[in-house]
Amino acid sequence: MADTQTDMKAVICTRYGGPDVLALGHVRRIAPGPGQIEIAVQNATVNRTDTATLRAHPFFARGMTGWLRPRHKVPGMDFAGVVARVGDGVERFAVGDRVFGMSPERFGTYAEFLVIEAEGPVATLPDGVALDEAVICEGAWYASATVNQLKSGQSLLIYGASGAIGTAALQLAKARCGGYGRCGHAASEPCAGVGSGSGDQLSGRGFYRSGAAFRHGVRCGRANVMV
């Protein structure tokens, strides 16, 4: 029987494989240390990093996740929830704060509670945004690596703008400089919904004829992100 004071429910993965290797169980609930916060996880996602890590794909990723078996047995990267406890020295957050973020190194979001660094990739959720709408960090994390290269006067062409990384890149680019989303006709509505105006959607071969100059290219999953 689980100790309700020191244990918590979690999805556990002790070997690589498909969804069938996941099991619901109990793991030790860890108290936050100095500079850390504990979050009561309310929402999490299943993103492409989660599925790739589950299968140890590509193979060389085992150098980071564990050669023979997962180094961290509770998977999950994105989260949204409420701060349950704070460690010594934490001033950025207080108990009861609604937060969202990601745990890209130790994972662990498929559990009732998660302990992370208060200065890590976590932020207070704006008022009016529901917890289940905020669990989008993985796509934004990959997109920001390219968008952060933008300088004043540059624009960004997102090839495949309707996916998780593409929609995040489009929003970040629009906020920073300017963004052009390249997507098929069927995907134009999602692009418009995240801030791409009709003049910014380049379907088919439209971006070849747009006259815009893009100096750098970065491969982002199956989509090209060009600056």
Image (cartoon, helix red, strand yellow):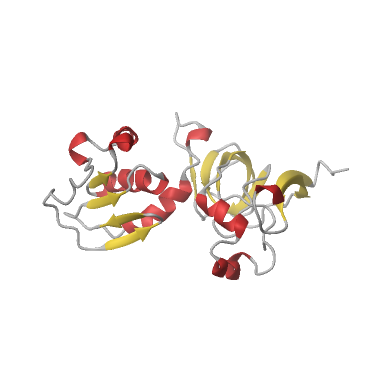
Image-quadrant location for residue 144: bottom left
Measured along the vertical axis of the image, is residue 188 above or below residue 150? above
Q: Residue furthest front?
A: 204
Measured along the vertical axis of the image, is residue 133 above or below residue 12? above
Pick the residue in front: 70 or 58. Answer: 58
Q: Is residue 194 visible?
A: no
Residue 224 is situated, as x and y percent measured from the top left of the image, at 32, 56
Q: Residue furthest top?
A: 128
Horizontally, residue 199 falls left or right of residue 1, namely: left
Residue 137 is situated, as x and y percent measured from the top left of the image, at 47, 47
Q: Number of labelled discs? A: 0
Q: Residue furthest left?
A: 211
What's the residue at 34%, 48% (across, down)? 169
What's the residue at 22%, 47% (across, down)? 178
Pick the residue in front: 13 or 57. Answer: 57
Pick the residue in front: 19 or 98. Answer: 19
Residue 90 is situated, as x and y percent measured from the top left of the image, at 57, 52
Image-quadrant location for residue 84: top right
Q: Is residue 101 visible?
A: yes
Horizontally, residue 64 falls left or right of residue 185, namely: right
Pick the residue in front: 20 or 76. Answer: 20
Horizontally, residue 3 falls left or right of residue 47, namely: right
Measured along the vertical axis of the image, is residue 57 above or below residue 25? below
What's the residue at 50%, 41% (across, down)? 135
Which quadrant is the C terminus positioned in?
bottom left
Which quadrant is the N terminus positioned in?
top right
What's the residue at 54%, 45% (across, down)? 93
